[in-house]
Image: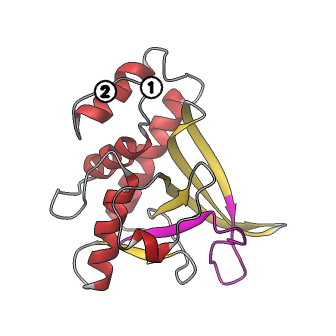
Amino acid sequence: MATTFSKRLVNIAIKEHQKYYLIREQQEPLTSQIQNYWTDVSPFPGVSTPWSGVFISWSVRQAGATADEFRFAAAHARFVRKAIQDYKNQLGVFHGRNVDDYAPKVGDILQNNRSGNSFDYSYASTHSEYESHSAIVIEVGADHLGRYLRTIGGNEGDSFGLKEVRLDSDGYVKNPKGLYISVIETLK
């Protein structure tokens, strides 16, 4: 069952997607909204700088998380590493889980490699500076092809993206090519 926080996080992602998915980052009103995401985390460098991490950070903050609970950052690697450390130490309300050992649920955050990289959970647990991406899990379900989850992420195709990820029969992300790295489990 999704928590109140998870429901808020999912609703925020859905609303942002609905408002902006047909607009590119260089077009208003999305350009101004991207600036809002950035200024919630750090100075705005312009829309040409990847903004997916600040979208996640902004969304988590808007849903009610504090800086003590979540490492708000422009780089996905930074908030993933803190979540992994919190999981290993059994602290906090955001736990970075190995994508191969945890079945994602609504309100979690799925992290994946970008640009052909092949970083894994072990690497993510010890590094805060590497290129990756993440998106908010908004749905987990099943259809005629089996189990799936859907995510919403920012800076996907210079706008918002809605993606479907196939799951195995136990609910784990199918990951034959190592695209996915971790899942931030939301316990808040």
Taking depth in this image into account, of 18 and 82 the one nearest to the observer is 82
Give the secondary structure at mark 1. Answer: loop
Q: Is residue 60 visible?
A: yes
Q: Farthest residue toward the right?
A: 144
Q: Bounds of the magenta span?
A: 165-188
69 is higher (above) or lower (below) than 135? below
Residue occupying image coordinates x 44% and y 62%? 107
For disc 1, the neighbor class at 10 Å (few under 14, some 14 to 19, many from 20) is few
- Name the image quarter holding the N terminus: bottom left
Q: Is residue 122 left or right of residue 61?
A: right
The numbered dot on residue 123 is none
Labelled pair 1, 2 in contact (Cβ < 8 Å): yes
Is 75 in the magenta?
Answer: no
Give the secondary structure at mark 2. Answer: loop
The numbered dot on residue 48 is 1
Residue occupying image coordinates x 38% and y 42%? 55
Q: Farthest residue toward the left?
A: 68
Q: Is residue 80 left or right of residue 137?
A: left
Residue occupying image coordinates x 54% and y 84%? 101
Q: Is residue 1 visible?
A: no
Q: Position of residue 179 (x, y in %)?
A: 63, 63
Q: Quadrant of residue 108?
A: bottom left
- Name the image quarter holding the C terminus: bottom left
Residue with the mark numbered 2: 45
Q: What amino acid type is highlighted by mark number 1?
A: Ser
